[in-house]
Image (cartoon, coloured by chain):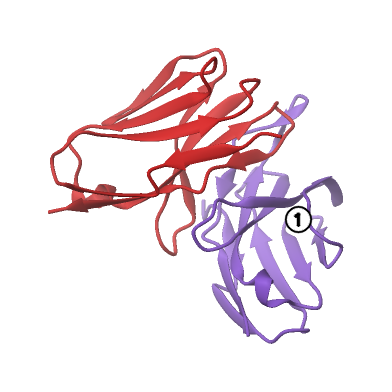
Chain colours: A red, B purple
Amino acid sequence: KQEVTQIPAALSVPEGENLVLNCSFTDSAIYNLQWFRQDPGKGLTSLLLIQSSQREQTSGRLNASLDKSSGRSTLYIAASQPGDSATYLCAVKKDSNYQLIWGAGTKLIIKP
Amino acid sequence: DAGVTQSPTHLIKTRGQQVTLRCSPKSGHDTVSWYQQALGQGPQFIFQYYEEEERQRGNFPDRFSGHQFPNYSSELNVNALLLGDSALYLCASSFLLGQGISEQYFGPGTRLTVT
């Protein structure tokens, strides 16, 4: 049974720092992995999607990497801003027809 | 495009009551999935609807049922509410792509509180 873990559960850093959020999964046979951002009252926003054949994806100040063999993904946020404060969740998909299996998220606070 | 919309935003019910939550998918999407997110947890998949039929179901009891209408909108019904049903209920829409589904787009959720 696939399990997804995110550590730490919460993180508080000063504005401007580069930071890394971690996601691990127990079954390396995945179809893809997604990183989402969740703001209170605003649902979930997809940030980056990495297919199983890819090693990383980049969007602006965000970079996500995937190492299937070790069951890990990282989300790198460069030059953090207060507007980056949110909960970040990762989710994996077993195959194209399966639903997402989610981690519990990392609550990120960027202090001005 | 309004994206995925859900109603109501918040809801308070009493144990034993029944509740109906509603979701309108993003334009062009024909598949709707429902998730339950307890406080501090990641979402858990409830079920998915396509062509007015339940296509997949997660590990939720029969108290949780759904419906999809010809315009692709969907309802989630929960009977005999328990305190543990208190959660954020998320709707996600997508479209069938070959054998699988496309990327899912999420609505803002309905916050259900059971007292």
Q: Position of residue B6 (x, y in %)?
A: 59, 64
Q: Quadrant of residue A55?
A: top left
Amino acid carrying label 1: it is: Asn
In the rendered structure, the residue with mark 1 lies on which chain?
B
Which quadrant would the C terminus of chain B be assigned to in this image? bottom right
Comparing B70 with B114, the one in front is B114
Comparing B69 with B86, the one in front is B86
Left or right position of A82 against A63: left
Left or right position of B10 against B14: left
Q: Element at badge 1?
A: loop
Compared with residue A3, is residue A37 higher up or lower down, i.e. above or below? below
Q: Position of residue A83 (x, y in %)?
A: 24, 51
Specify few, some or many for label 1: CA neighbours under 10 Å numbering under 14, 14-19, or 20 or more: few
Q: Can residue A90 be seen here?
A: no
**Which residue was labeled with disc 1?**
B71
Compared with residue A69, is residue B14 higher up or lower down, i.e. above or below? below
Compared with residue A110, is residue A55 higher up or lower down, i.e. above or below? above
Comparing B71 with A105, the one in front is A105
Residue plotted at (45% across, 47% down): A105
Q: Quadrant of residue A21?
A: top left
Residue plotted at (57% across, 54% down): B4
Left or right position of A102 against A7: right
Compared with residue A81, is residue B85 higher up or lower down, i.e. above or below? below
Q: Position of residue B55 (x, y in %)?
A: 84, 44
Residue plotted at (20% across, 40% down): A80
Count of numbered badges drawn on the protein: 1
Q: Can residue B64 be seen here?
A: yes
Left or right position of B59 against B3: right
